[in-house]
Image: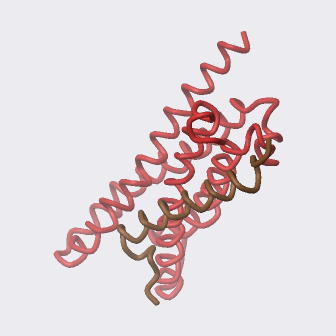
Amino acid sequence: MKNPLDSILGTIVSGVVLTLILYLFLKNFIVAGV
Amino acid sequence: MDFMLDGLFRWLHFLAGITWIGLLYYFNFVQVPAMKEATADGTAAGISRHVAPRALLWFRWSALVTWLAGAALLGGNFMHAFRLEPAYAGVGVGAWLGTIMLFNVWVLIWPNQKKILGLVAASEEAKNKARRVAFLASRTNTMLSIPMLFFMANGLTHKAAVGL
């Protein structure tokens, strides 16, 4: 499988996906119920 | 007084941060793609000799200043943020990502760039390995800058809007 970081588009898409994952993780596991 | 200091640290954090991330984007979106074409037509030496060392100088020191100004801005909340305590979880994730990026700059990118640019002695094989490590560390930082800026920008000032 090609490394997404080898292309600029793959890098940006990876960053956006990581943003979404971290956001959902924080919202559901860290600040949930506070 | 604390209010004034906070303002100064925030200002410095932004100035240094723009310098750092601006140069990171310059490397990834401009210089690296241009180097391929410059190597093909024999003009890459000018970039390697005159542009890259200057850009790297501002890049690595602005990274350190950004982190120090950010740490000063967090002040007494520094540990709350890094422990991802709920009230500071958003900016805490931003701080963790920024810290990983600073590590990449000083431990992976700069030592390998010194080999690539000939500032320290290295065999051709070591230079080729250094190119790949520095490239991937730089691309990793570009990727991490996207969530880092989201959480830095929204973690404290737009907590209600983003629910963090």
Is B24 on the left or on the right of B44, as rendered? right
Q: Position of residue B116 (x, y in %)?
A: 46, 72
Q: Is residue B119 at all visible to an observer of this figure?
A: no
The residue positioned 48% from the left and 78% from the top of the image is B132
Is A29 on the left or on the right of B122, as rendered? right
Q: Please tell me which residue lies in front, B47 or B72.
A: B72
Q: Position of residue A7 (x, y in %)?
A: 37, 73
Considering only vertical position in the picture, is B27 above or below B6?
Answer: below
Question: Dividing the picture into quarters, in which one does residue B69 lie?
Answer: top right
The residue positioned 21% from the left and 73% from the top of the image is B37
Considering only vertical position in the picture, is A18 above or below B156?
Answer: below
The residue positioned 60% from the left and 20% from the top of the image is B8
Question: Which quarter of the image is occupied by the N terminus of chain B?
Answer: top right
Question: Dividing the picture into quarters, in which one does residue B78 lie?
Answer: top right
> In the image, which lettered chain appears red?
B
Q: Is residue B144 at all visible to an observer of this figure?
A: yes
Image color mode: by chain
Total count of labels: 0
Q: Position of residue B72 (x, y in %)?
A: 71, 31
Give the residue at the far top of this rendering.
B1
Considering only vertical position in the picture, is B5 above or below B132?
Answer: above
Q: Position of residue B163 (x, y in %)?
A: 63, 41
Question: Which quarter of the image is occupied by the C terminus of chain B?
Answer: top right
Give the residue at the far front of this rendering.
A33
**Chain A display color:** brown
